[in-house]
Image (cartoon, grey):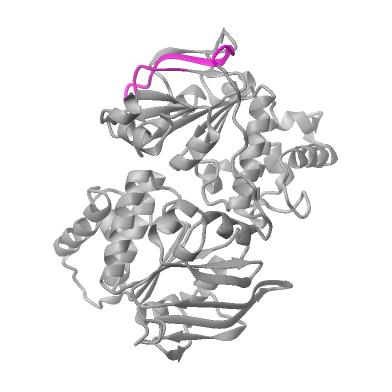
Amino acid sequence: MDSETAAPPRLRLENIVKSFGPVRALKNAQFDLRPGEIHALAGENGAGKSTLMNIVDGILQPDSGRIFVDGEEVTIASPAAAQALGIGLVHQEIALCPDLSIAENLFMSATATSGRLLMDFGTLRRRAQEVMDRLQPIPVDTRVGDLSISEQQLVEIAKALTLDCRVLIFDEPTAALTEPEAQRLFAILRDLRARGMSLVYISHRMAEIFALCDRITVMRDGNHVSTDPIAALSPETVVNRLVGRELSRLFPHKAQDLSQKPPVLSVRGLSDGRRFEDVSFELRHGEILGFAGLIGAGRTEIAEAVCALRPRTHGDIALNGVPLTQQSYAGSIRSGVVYLSEDRKASGVFVDLPIAQNVTALRPSLVSRFGLIDQARERSFADALGRKVGLKRGRITDPVSSLSGGNQQKVGIAKMLSVNPSVIFLDEPTRGVDVGAKAEIYDILRELASAGTGIAVISSELPELIGLCDRILVVHEGRIAGEVADGPLMTEEHIIALASGLQPPASAAA
C-alpha cells in the first residue's frame, strides 16, 4: 500500500481563513502533516505561518475552514484542548516565568492540573534534569531569569519535550541557539520522528530545512503556495517562492583587500575580570568583522565592555587612534561607538512607542528646541533615516509593534545611525528575520561599511558570518581562539573547531 494512503494525515488543515479587522492574515490556507515526518513551514514574516499554527494550538480561532486530527474533524478551542489532542507548540517568543526555577517552569502545567495537595518535587526535579540534559546540562534549580536568551530558548524547547504529544510545532527554535546547540536539537527531532512523532518546523534558515525536513510547505501573503518533498527542490527555488520573485543573491560582495586600511577601532588586552580576558583586535575601515563562538563564550560581553555597557578591569580602546575612556554607554554614544542588542524586543527597540520616537531615542536633543521635542522635526528626521534603511511602514507615528521583525530590526539600525556612529556592534542582527529582509539588512550593513562605518557582527548563524563578514574572530571561553580571513579557511568546520577549543582540522590548517 502506498505510504501516503496507508493512514490519514496526523494533522490536516483545509481552507483556513483568518482576519484581524480589515487585514486578512490567512486566505484559504492548506496544510497536512503525516505520521512520522518533519514538515517545514516556510514563508516571509507576515506570510501567515505563526497565525496558522496558533490556530492549530487553539490560541486563535479560524473564521472558517476545517481541522482534522487522524482523519477526525475537530474544534480546537484552547491550548488545553490542543494538548488533549496531543498537539504542542514551542513558541518563538519565550514564555517562561523568570522568577521560578527551570524545573518549576518545565512542569508548571503538570503541577497545575494534577489536583494534588502535595507534589513530589524530588521526582519532578529528577525528570526535569533528564530532559534538560538531552539539550544542555544546566542545573534545573537555576532561576530562569538568570539564564541567557539561548538557555531560556532551550528551556522552552525542553518544556515541550515533557508533553505527551503526537504533534509538536517548533516556531524558529534555533533563532537563539549556537550551531552545536542546534545540532543537539536536530538529533532529538530526528529521534522523535523515528518514534513516529509528527513535527512542524517553522524556520527562515534554508540550510536547517534541507538538512532536517522531509517536506516543505511555502506560504506567501496568507496563501498556500506549494508543498513538495525536500528532495525535489533546491534552496534557490524555495527562496524564490518565499519572496515571490527571483532573489539572485543573499549576501553583498565583500570588500577587496582591507589589510592596508587603518583601524577605526583598536582594542588591546581587554578584560572584565569574569567573562573574558586579554582580548585584542582591530576593526578596519570598510570592514565587516564577525564574532563567532558558543553561547557563553563571551562574545556579547566583549561588545558590551567596548561600549561601556559592562565595566572593564583592564585594557585599552582607541577610536581612530584616539584613546576612549568613557565610563557609561551615554559616553560611548557621544564617542561614536554604539551597540544593538540581540534581544530586540526587550532592549533593541521600544515596541510600544512610535517609530519616530524609537529612531531618535539615543539622542533626543537632535530634534529638540529649548528642551522640548519638536515633533515635526522628529518625524522628518526619522522619516529620512527610515528611507535610508529601506523601512517599510505605515505612518511614522505607528508603534514599532505594528512592523514585521525585519522592519523592527531596521528601526533599531536607524536608531544607531541617528547619532552618526563610527562603530556599530550588532548582536544577532537577523534573528527571527525572513530571508528577503535578511538580504536587505546585509546590503545596509555593507553600504555602511563601504561609507566608512566600522561594522562588527555577533552571530550564532555561521553561514551568515561566512557570507557577510570580511574577517571572523572566534571566541572560546573568554579569549580570542583564532582569526579567520575570507578565503579557503572560512568554513563552518574550521570555525566550530576553534570555537570548541579544538585544533583546526589538518586540511583547514594547511
Quarter assignment of residue 326? top right
Nearest the camera: 250 or 447?
Answer: 250
Quarter assignment of residue 418? top right
Quarter assignment of residue 8? bottom left
Magenta-colored stretch includes residue 271: yes
Residue at image coords 33%, 50%: 183
* Percent coordinates x, y for residue 340 in the rendering: 56, 36
Q: Is residue 160 above or below residue 264?
A: below
Magenta-colored stretch includes residue 275: yes
Left of 350 or right of it: where is 209?
left
Q: Is residue 313 above or below residue 159?
A: above
Q: Which residues are magenta?
A: 259-281
Left of 344 or right of it: where is 141?
left
Nearest the camera: 180 or 320?
Answer: 180
Q: Is residue 394 above or below residue 313?
A: below
Nearest the camera: 118 or 72?
Answer: 72
Left of 479 or right of it: where is 285?
right
Hey, which residue is sitting farthest right in the picture? Answer: 376
Image quarter (top left, top right, bottom left or bottom right) of the N terminus: bottom left
Image quarter (top left, top right, bottom left or bottom right) of the C terminus: top left
* Percent coordinates x, y for residue 444 in the rendering: 66, 37
- Residue 100 seen in this snapshot: no
* Percent coordinates x, y for residue 467 in the rendering: 52, 37
Q: Is residue 449 above or below residue 412?
A: above
Residue at image coords 64%, 52%: 352
- How many labels sit on residues? 0
